[in-house]
Amino acid sequence: GQQLNQSPQSMFIQEGEDVSMNCTSSSIFNTWLWYKQDPGEGPVLLIALYKAGELTSNGRLTAQFGITRKDSFLNISASIPSDVGIYFCAGQLSGNQFYFGTGTSLTVIP
Amino acid sequence: NAGVTQTPKFRVLKTGQSMTLLCAQDMNHEYMYWYRQDPGMGLRLIHYSVGEGTTAKGEVPDGYNVSRLKKQNFLLGLESAAPSQTSVYFCASSLFRDNEQFFGPGTRLTVL
């Protein structure tokens, strides 16, 4: 299967700090998605990106589709305790399934 | 709108036993998916369906079978459970292939 490398694997930050995480692949993807998963729940979509270079915001979250189409990043500004969870990237090849990264675990210390 | 629901939420099986996981969605979505989630592995696609009566293999289909007899339901079967199938199983659905996937709450399966 396709390998999506997500980094960092885990983060411990103070409340109010900004967060940045990214996802890279050796393959070119047509779509990038970012999901958040709370403990005991299924992933919930945060942001979807469909074009190379696209920069999309959703409240305090901003994500970008890399120009090379092989990477994407997610930024969270002014983190709050409810941002705690695991963040997954997912990429879709042309006409094919989505492949998920291994996740970034975020802990926000009040 | 319940979205995507999964039953059961938890299950413990002995090696060699069989079981069926049920996924239901009330959003009239065409596509449905079964994933497994293991520590450090992310989500991996087991099987998926592009419409009622159709199924296709994903990345890790061995040891699983699926059926989509009704548009709103997608069943995942384990004929002879093995400890390697201990995992959390997620069902998802999407309107079409390129649309957002909505996930269910997951089923935690332990095979002893």
Image (cartoon, rainbow, N blue to C red):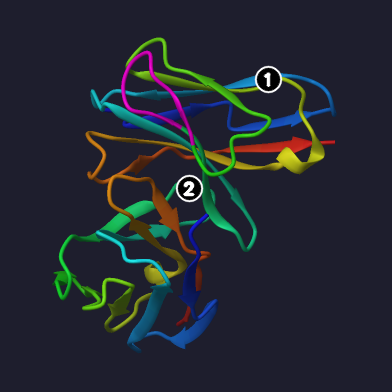
In magenta segment, residue B53? yes
Residue beneath disc 1? B19
Point out the image quarter for the C terminus of chain A.
bottom left
Q: For the residue labelled by badge 1, is the local secondary structure a helix, a strand or a loop?
A: strand
Query: Relative to A106, does residue B31 appear above or below in the rendering?
Result: above
Q: Residue at x 25, y 59 (%)?
A: A30
**Dot 1 and dot 2 within a common chain:** no
Q: Which residues are magenta?
A: B48-57
Q: Residue A78's spot in the image, x, y percent?
A: 28, 84
Give residue A34's mark. none
Q: Nearer the viewer, residue B69 or B91?
A: B69
Q: Residue at x 42, y 71 (%)?
A: A25
In magenta segment, residue A34? no
Would you say A82 lies left or right of B105 here? left
> Amino acid type of disc 2?
Glu
- Is residue B86 at least partly visible in the picture? yes
Closest to the camera, between mark 1 and mark 2, is 1
Cβ–Cβ under 8 Å for marks 1 and 2: no
Would you say B89 lies left or right of A75 here? right
* CA neighbours of label 1 inside 10 A, class few (<14), some (14 to 19), many (20+): some
Q: For the residue labelled by badge 2, is the local secondary structure a helix, a strand or a loop?
A: loop
Between the C-alphas of marks 1 and 2, the distance is 22 Å
Query: Relative to A37, does residue A11 appear above or below in the rendering?
Result: below
Give residue A41's mark. 2
Residue A91 quadrant = bottom left
Q: Chain of mark 2?
A: A
Q: Residue B83's spot in the image, x, y percent?
A: 80, 39
